[in-house]
Image (cartoon, rainbow, N blue to C red):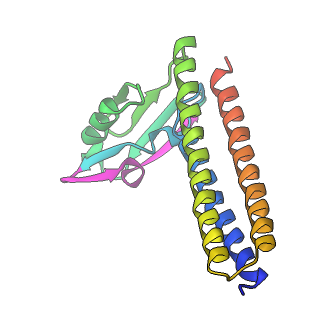
């Protein structure tokens, strides 16, 4: 018979994996542009640096020097054209201007239509996070049922573990929903 500790280990492992899904979802939220300048909106940009696709963060210092201005300072001045090209070709919708040393990205005011599009994007990111959490729950539920069928745990213990697992799942989904609400409010806020 499996001991209660093994069931708790399964629940603990699920909680940790769900926590990672939550953090990944929050990280994705950070890459969605709001009305304020945030270096995180450039996180997905890859630059062709001497034939290798390299994350922009590894090639330059990115800072929000003003509420609507990002500055990108390349560590290697010769990469400035490649960085500028990558920003132009990306989906962030910003036009870079460079003075040979620094690239400046001015964030225009978001239109109502663009705010609504971005709100849809973050709702999709949140749904992906919820699906990831539910997939973890499904996998652990399967493991619990296998333990019961193998006779390693009793019906009552399995049911208690499923209840605990559901409580952890509900808590993580609630956290994703709260993060979504905060991000939507940030996007829809007119400054």
Find the residue positioned furthest to the left: 51
Residue 57 part of the magenta segment: yes
Query: Which of these two is toward me, 147 or 85?
Result: 147
Q: Position of residue 19 (x, y in %)?
A: 66, 58
Residue 65 in the figure: left or right of residue 6: left
* Front residue of 76 and 129: 129
Quadrant (top left, top right, bottom left, bottom right) of the C terminus: top right
Camera sees residue 7 = yes
Q: Is residue 68 visible?
A: no
> In the image, is 134 to the left or to the right of 84?
right
For residue 44, above or below residue 69: below
Q: Position of residue 124 (x, y in %)?
A: 54, 34
Q: Is residue 132 left or right of residue 180?
A: left
Picture quadrant where residue 35 is located: top right
Residue at the image point whose x is 18% and y is 53% from the top: 51
Which residue reaches farthest top? 112
Residue at image x 75%, y 85%? 3
Q: Is residue 99 magenta?
A: no
Dominant SS type (magenta): strand
Look at the image and give the residue range highlighted in magenta.
Answer: 49-65
Q: Position of residue 126 (x, y in %)?
A: 60, 39
Residue 189 sits in quarter: top right
Which residue is rendered at x = 56% and y = 37% of the image?
A: 38
Q: For the point 35% across and 40% down, which residue is it? A: 101
């Amino acid at each position: 018979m499996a001991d209660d500790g093994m069931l708790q280990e399964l629940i603990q492992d699920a909680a940790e994996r769900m926590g990672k899904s939550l953090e990944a979802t929050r990280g994705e939220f950070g890459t969605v542009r709001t009305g304020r300048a945030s270096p995180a909106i450039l996180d997905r940009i890859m630059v062709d640096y001497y034939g290798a696709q390299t994350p922009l963060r590894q090639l330059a210092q990115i800072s929000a020097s003003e509420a609507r201005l990002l500055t990108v300072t390349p560590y290697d001045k010769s990469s400035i054209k490649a960085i500028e090209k990558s920003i132009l070709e990306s989906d962030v919708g910003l036009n870079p201007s460079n003075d040979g040393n620094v690239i400046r990205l001015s964030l225009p005011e978001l239109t109502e239509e663009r705010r609504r599009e971005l709100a849809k994007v973050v709702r999709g990111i949140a749904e992906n996070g919820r699906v990831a959490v539910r997939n973890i729950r499904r996998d652990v539920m399967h493991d619990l049922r296998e333990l019961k069928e193998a006779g390693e745990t009793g019906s009552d213990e399995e049911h208690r573990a499923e209840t605990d697992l559901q409580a952890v799942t509900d808590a993580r989904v609630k956290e994703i929903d709260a993060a979504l609400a905060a991000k939507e409010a940030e996007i829809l806020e007119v400054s």
